[in-house]
Image (tube, rainbow, N blue to C red):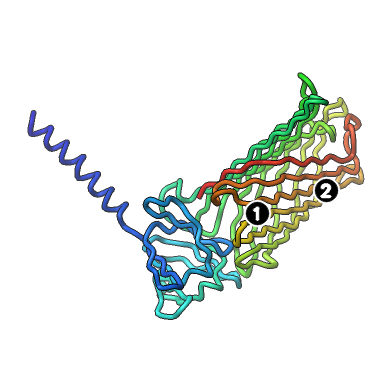
Amino acid sequence: MMTKRYIILFAISFFFMVKCGVAQKTDTILHINGNVLTGDFKKMVYGVVTWKMDGMGTISLDEVKVNSIKSRKQFEVKMKDGTIYFGSIDTSSVEKNLVIQSKEGNKTVDIREIVEIYPIKGNFWRRMSGNFSLGLNYSKGSKLATLSLSGNLDYRKKKTYFDLTWDFYNTYQGDSLGSSKWDVTLAWQRYLAYKWSTQVAFGTSSNTELGNKLRLVLSVVGLRDLVYNNWNRFYAGAGLAVNRETPYDTTGITTDMTGLFQVVWKVYKYSNPKVWVDASVFFVPYMTGDSRYRVVANLTPKVSLFNDNFKIGLNLYYTIDSRPPPSAISKDDYGINLELTYSFH
């Protein structure tokens, strides 16, 4: 009996020793001033390295301060010209360069030409990133309150990623709900070649102001990166979608085929104060049913607080429907909210 206990204790101890040994494996960053930093390299995007160090937690390091990087983990490395490499990364004897090690051989690249480095192996959590935002506005004189909840979750795999986004806006007048708007979208995107990607998305939304009780949308879109560098990404897309709409009135459910055109711009400024700006415009012309179109625009500028995980900023939206249901209060709707955001990974 005692021997069995010792065997179990030894097995548990050995397991933790192995885990600790794995945890002690470190990545290396060579700083331009000659310093060598050891820790856990998470990713690099928009010219910023996300880096975890013992005792300091997760920090951000500007790409301009990095001379080279070494990590045995497997990464997806995307270049400005759209080329993608897969493999581990090692330091180079050439200044501001690193070596991508793969089964096809070694490739030396200039760090200044890299726009993304993401891990492609590891556990589920390491491939996940996202943010959560909360906003609340209240006026005592009018007893008017607005609550907003928004965020997104990204899950990345080799050449593909899933993106779940949501936003909820509720306006309360006194003790009753005055109006509400919400959108939830799950998108799957796969990189093809030469800066082209394809995207399949399913979305659902509601807007009391525009008379929309429930809208379901399934879309297929082709995307192309027009500009992608260390501080911004600007891309456009076009495709088709199927819309199924349920109005608040009794006019009945409709199903229509629509076009879908979109322009998206993401900006990041890494000098203090650090600034993030996400902007998008969607144009939806109806191909069946009555002559109709919808436009949806979003703008979310944010600045960092005491670190990159916490941000404060605005969430602005504007949407117009040229032919809303008869129950609609207006043909357009807009809102602006101050939000506090927490980001991870």
Indicate whether 111 appears above or below 341: below
Indicate whether 265 appears above or below 103: above
The amino acid sitting under disc 2 is Val
**What residue is shown at x 89% (from left), y 45% (from top)?**
292
The residue at which mark 1 appears reads as: 199
Residue 103 appears in the rendering: no
The residue lying toward the viewer, choosing from 291 and 4, is 4
The residue lying toward the viewer, choosing from 7 and 52, is 52
Measured from the top left, where is residue 161 in percent x and y? 56, 53
The amino acid sitting under disc 1 is Gln
> Which callout, 2 or 1, points at the residue further toward the start of the chain?
1
**What residue is shown at x 60% (from left), y 62% (from top)?**
271
Indicate whether 69 appears above or below 315: below
The residue at which mark 2 appears reads as: 295
- The residue carrying pointer 1 sits among few (fewer than 14), some (14 to 19) or many (20 or more) residues within 10 Å by Cα, namely some
Measured from the top left, where is residue 289 in percent x and y? 88, 42
Identity of the residue furthest to the bottom in this view: 94
**What residue is shown at x 67% (from left), y 59% (from top)?**
267
Q: Quadrant of the N terminus?
A: top left
Residue 13 occupies which quadrant of the picture?
top left
